[in-house]
């Protein structure tokens, strides 16, 4: 998959941002520019990483069926997601500790999302504050909440999001314990990143990243550091954080209480079964993100795209359904829509680009995905997103 870009390095070439023509190219450039523990945190997943691979491979199991002579000189790629207009049926999923990947962190992603008219989310483990992001952009934005054992912290975060007028709250429901992320165990990756004897050479040979990390503003988790030190002043692994700080007793009553406390547009992130999708409808959620956390939790679980038909059959039309994970192409977005999703979303699709070149990288990646989607719609013979329906998709075998 990565042969062309990898070959450029093997032949002694210097890959540039302008050499990136798809998301896989950004991955290769990110790998070259990041110390290996940081890259492996973005790129890695749980156990044997089978689910991570399946998340993208699932899209290859179905084919698009185009119409021709459809008059596609003018097309409209926009849609409504969670009550706000989006220029594309694509969301940028919330991801943690972005300052570790590039010094611009969430600010770069927020600005790029606003430029392209897209929803984006920030994590409870964001390295920019709720208030800073709210002041930075008027675009649609979502906050992703982890439920901590410290109920005062949960309430504090929700109140900050309300005051900052975030458009939606997404409760992540698949991280009550951490998946076994073996690459991180081998590399010793922590937040904040720390230099170890095994990794010091990798940091030393990436001076741009290392100087930015050491000399620019201090790494912190400003949405948590009023209550906890883990991951901010004290270096811990993500697994340690999940396993010690998050509430393993969280249940459907918890989700319903948080929805009521929030009082606004409410999303459940991490729903994978039809039964849970029905429960999400029952508690009054506005949307579900069909997601397995990028394959970073339960290895061997189904891919979100594989589960879409079952979930759409169960709750289609009652709730918005966002297919989250594995998206690398505009055609992947189209296939998700044909399968009944309201929109698609992903994290690595922009994290590789952020790590490769900051805001410039994210903007280039989004521009490529936009072009792919526009071109794909024209080649499919559709002029509007709502024309991407199930009759335009065929399953192999």
Image (tube, helix red, strand yellow):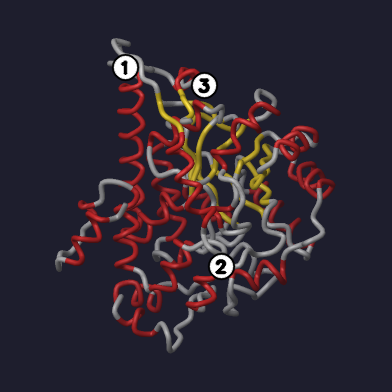
**SS under mark 3:** helix
Q: Which residue is mark 1?
A: 74
Q: Which of these two is toward me, 280 or 118? A: 280
Q: Which of these two is toward me, 5 or 122? A: 5
Instruction: Please rate how many residues cluster around mark 3, counting C-alpha atoms within 10 Å: few if below 14, some from 14 to 19, many from 20.
Output: some
The residue depicted at 44 percent of the width and 73 percent of the height is: 37
Q: Which residue is mark 2?
A: 181
Compute the Cα span from label 1 to label 3. 23 Å
Residue 138 seen from this side:
no
**SS under mark 1:** loop
Note whether 135 is above or below 76 in the view shown.
Answer: below
Q: Are marks 3 and 2 in contact (CB under 8 Å)?
A: no
Note whether 218 is above or below 166 in the view shown.
Answer: below
Compute the Cα span from label 3 to label 2. 36 Å
Q: Which of these two is toward me, 382 or 94? A: 382
Q: Position of residue 186 (x, y in %)?
A: 50, 77
Name the image quarter holding residue 357.
Answer: bottom left
Q: Position of residue 177 (x, y in %)?
A: 70, 63
Q: Are marks 1 and 3 in contact (CB under 8 Å)?
A: no
N-terminal label among 3 and 2: 2
Left or right side of 208 for 147? right
The residue depicted at 35 percent of the width and 77 percent of the height is: 210
The residue depicted at 62 percent of the width and 50 percent of the height is: 301
Identity of the residue furthest to the right in this view: 253
Q: Position of residue 219 (x, y in %)?
A: 50, 72
Q: Which residue is mark 3?
A: 390
């Amino acid at each position: 998959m990565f042969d062309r870009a990898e070959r450029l390095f093997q032949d002694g070439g210097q890959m540039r941002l302008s050499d990136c023509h798809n998301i896989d190219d950004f991955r290769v450039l990110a790998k070259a520019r990041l110390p290996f523990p940081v890259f492996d945190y973005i790129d890695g997943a749980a156990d044997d990483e089978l689910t991570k691979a399946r998340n993208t491979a699932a899209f290859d199991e179905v084919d698009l069926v185009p119409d021709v002579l459809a008059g596609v000189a003018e097309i409209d790629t926009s849609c409504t997601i969670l009550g706000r207009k989006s220029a594309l049926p694509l969301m940028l999923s919330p991801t943690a500790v972005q300052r570790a990947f590039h010094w611009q962190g969430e600010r770069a992603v927020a600005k790029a999302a606003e430029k392209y008219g897209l929803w984006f989310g920030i994590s409870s483990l964001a390295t920019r504050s709720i208030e800073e992001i709210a002041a930075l952009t008027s675009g649609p934005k979502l906050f992703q909440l982890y439920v901590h054992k410290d109920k005062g912290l949960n309430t504090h975060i929700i109140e900050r999001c309300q005051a900052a007028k975030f458009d939606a709250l997404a409760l992540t429901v698949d991280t009550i314990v951490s998946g076994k992320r073996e690459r991180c165990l081998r590399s010793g990756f922590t937040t904040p990143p720390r230099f170890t004897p095994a990794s010091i050479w990798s940091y030393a040979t990436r001076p741009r990243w290392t100087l930015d990390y050491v000399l620019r503003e201090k790494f912190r988790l400003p949405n948590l550091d009023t209550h906890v030190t883990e991951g901010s002043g004290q270096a811990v692994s993500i697994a340690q954080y999940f396993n010690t700080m998050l509430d393993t007793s969280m249940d459907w009553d918890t989700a319903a209480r948080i929805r009521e406390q929030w009082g606004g547009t409410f999303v459940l992130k991490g729903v994978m079964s039809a039964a849970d999708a029905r429960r999400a409808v029952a508690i009054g959620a506005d949307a579900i993100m069909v997601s397995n956390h990028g394959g970073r939790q339960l290895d061997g679980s189904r891919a979100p795209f594989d589960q879409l038909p079952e979930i759409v059959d169960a709750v289609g039309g009652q709730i918005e359904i966002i297919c989250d994970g594995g998206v690398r192409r505009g055609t992947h977005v189209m296939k998700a829509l044909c399968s009944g999703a309201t929109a698609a979303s992903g994290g690595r699709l922009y994290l590789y680009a952020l790590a490769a070149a900051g805001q410039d990288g994210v903007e280039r990646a989004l521009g490529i995905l936009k072009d792919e989607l526009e071109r794909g719609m024209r080649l499919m013979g559709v002029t509007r997103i709502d024309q991407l329906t199930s009759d335009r998709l065929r399953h192999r075998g």
